[in-house]
Amino acid sequence: MFAAERRQLILEMVRANGAVSLRELARVVQTSEVTVRRDVRALEAEGLLDRRHGGAVLPGGFSRESGFPQKSHLATAEKTAIADLAAGLVGEGEAIVVGAGTTTQELARRLARVPGLTVVTNSLLVAQALAHANRVEVVMTGGTLRGSNYGLVGSGAEQSLQGLRVSRAFLSGAGLTAERGLSTSNMLSASVDRALVQAAAEVVVLADHTKLGTDTMFQTVPTDQITHLVTDDSEPDDERAGTELQALADRGVQVTVAPVPGAGAAAASAATAETLASGRGLPGPRRHHPLRGAPPLGSAGEGSAARLADVRRR
């Protein structure tokens, strides 16, 4: 495929999906990520798209929201790795809230084997993933169905969360920056996510590398309310991603990086399991104790293939 053909296809994918990872672009155009990265830079220079950590987005600063069919095929390996690691944070007998999204859907699939778990959610996808888990109780919020992400929104959803208190909330979003925290492109979704946050003692954000440094219209969780970020290491040599993660850690967010099989294998093997802001990883102004009911993050790799990776790659 010639360079002009590749770049046209890359543009079409970004316009159709809003944001696409370099890995996905390389798979579709059947070339290396190095070549795709060069193409993305050329398209950015022409003002046709914007680069983000490990991917490309529509130009204009704020990303628009993709629908579920597009999201479900984006960064699938990264979402799987994040979900595998995040599931280890949930202990037997806990009560948690889980927001809408394709990454939280992956998490829900792994929570089905946690005995005595209670999951409160506004996501039909999360509820569906847990529907046949005999040992898990699922509580749905009320609200109006939003077809693009199969989430329940509106006053009915928010009112059903009033007076609720759980150990932690697991949320994803359309973008994450150290300056604004987690954000999304839809006002109604943002409002319900804020209600989920208010119901939880701690907030865990699940965000793949394509979300880092991306800012969208409506803030859902300010940085100072995020306890823990679980992300991936698909772009271990991306200095901008490292800078964003360092800034989050400096603001007190505990950052954990899940290695993605086949992505940056050499760098991932050199940077072995470490939890950021724990004294051995990225420093933060305050320390977080391991989440209650979950195994200590420093030992999250025990019993799991996932290992924590230090993103402080110099």
Image (spheres, rainbow, N blue to C red):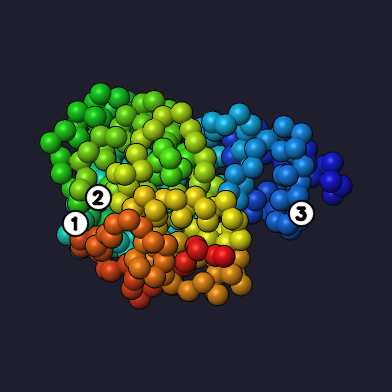
In the rendered image, the vertical position of residue 120 relative to residue 117, given as above or below: above
Look at mark 2 in the image and give the residue it sits on: 202
Q: Quadrant of residue 101?
A: top left
The image quarter containing residue 45 is top right
Tell me the residue that label 3 is attached to: 35
Q: Is residue 26 visible?
A: yes
How far is mark 2 from mark 3, CA to CA? 41 Å
Residue 122: percent from left, percent from top: 30, 37
Q: What label does residue 82 carry, if any?
A: none
Q: What amino acid type is highlighted by mark number 3?
A: Thr
Quadrant location, the C terminus: bottom right
Q: Are marks 2 and 1 in contact (CB under 8 Å)?
A: no
Q: Is residue 75 visible?
A: no
Q: Nearer the viewer, mark 2 or mark 1?
A: 2
Q: Give the side of residue 261 with respect to residue 285, left or right.
A: right
Residue at image position (41%, 29%) is 218
Above or below — where is 120 with respect to 297? Answer: above
Q: CA distance from mark 2 to mark 1?
A: 13 Å
> Counting residues from the N terminus, which is met first, the one under dot 2 or under dot 1?
1
Q: Secondary structure at mark 2?
A: strand
